[in-house]
Amino acid sequence: MDSYTDFALVYDTFMDETPYSEWADFISDLIQKYGITKTKKQDKSPQDSKESDGLDGGDEKQLLSQERDLVVELGCGTGSFAQEMAGRGYDIMGIDNSEQMLQIAIDKRDKSGYDIMYLEQDMREFELYSTAGTFLSVCDSVNYLTDPEDVVKMLRLVNNYLFPGGIIIFDFNTVYKYRDVIGNTTIAEDRDDCAFIWDNWYDSDTCINEYDLTIFVHEEGDRYRRFNETHFQRGYTLEEMIGIVEASGMDLVTTIDADTHEDPTDESERIYIIARKNSDNNITVYKEEE
């Protein structure tokens, strides 16, 4: 999981074509369709009055609505997606285990003026001060959990911290994408202030995708600083991920092809999973496919 170190310095440069704004629009629509979380711009009084029945005073009512309307992003990286969600009126918190990535996220927050809390924690072992109405994880963060049991562990934690009726929306890259689209390739790209060479290998036996990055960052004159990083991600099939959700005790709501926004197919490269809190904690033992 400790993948992003020096790469954090150039991460946004190499991700500058990522459609964070489009993702945020779509995920916001999914939250409004399937979830309970509201934005700061929405009228909350009718729902809040229902939830506060039997409670004394406005303070408890306000606390309930604050927890219901909190969004937590797991694997938030440099905060680009959190910025987009904050701009749409969501009360959002970001969690990541890379200090370097979070420092960049904090710099963005300070420049934008958005009120975003960032926590340096592992998505498999995070701790929160309250429940939250919605959890998110995008941009293949879940694929960095190369042991399916770790995905189960993460989802059980999410289930524990979700406000009643709350949901998680997360994406993952499929086996098809790593095996048939990316495969064993080398990619090189040159930018104004940096360049990189990306060597990719996929192991079909383990479903592990390894990519070695060689990055050159311009410093001054003709001088460049070179550093290397190796990243590991695991591809999952839709059937595997559904089994993981079921083993976590959460209730599967729906699955969506992230590119077409239709039902996933055998050639889907990235898939959204939406799962809802299950208060019964009906967990099972996850068994990998043979």
Image (cartoon, grey):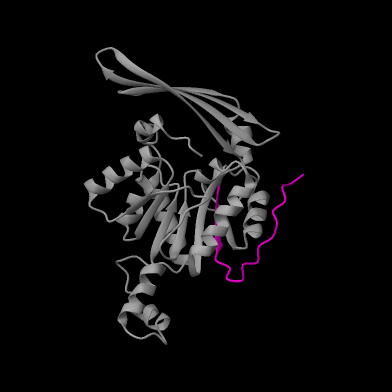
Where is residue 179 shown, x and y percent of the image? Answer: 63, 33
Answer yes or no: is residue 182 visible: yes
**Chief secondary structure of the magenta span?**
loop
**Whole-percent x, y for residue 25 in the image:** 39, 55
Q: Residue at x 32, y 84 (%)?
A: 57
Res 133 quadrant in image: bottom left
Q: Is residue 288 magenta?
A: yes
* Quadrant including the C terminus: top right
Judge whether residue 190 can be spotted in this image.
Answer: no
- Considering only vertical position in the picture, is 132 above or below 213? below
In this rendering, the answer to whether 203 lies above or below 266 is above
Name the quadrant containing residue 10.
top left
Residue lying at 55% horizontally and 65% vertically, measured from the top left = 276
Q: Is residue 254 above or below residue 149?
A: below
Residue 220 located left or right of residue 182: left
Q: Nearer the viewer, residue 169 or 219?
A: 219
Q: Position of residue 18 (x, y in %)?
A: 41, 40
The span picked out in magenta is 271-290
* The furthest residue to the top: 222
Q: Is residue 211 left or right of residue 107?
A: right
Q: Position of residue 56 (x, y in %)?
A: 35, 86
Q: Which residue sits at x=31%, y=78%?
A: 59
> Which residue appears at 46% of the width and 55% of the height?
136
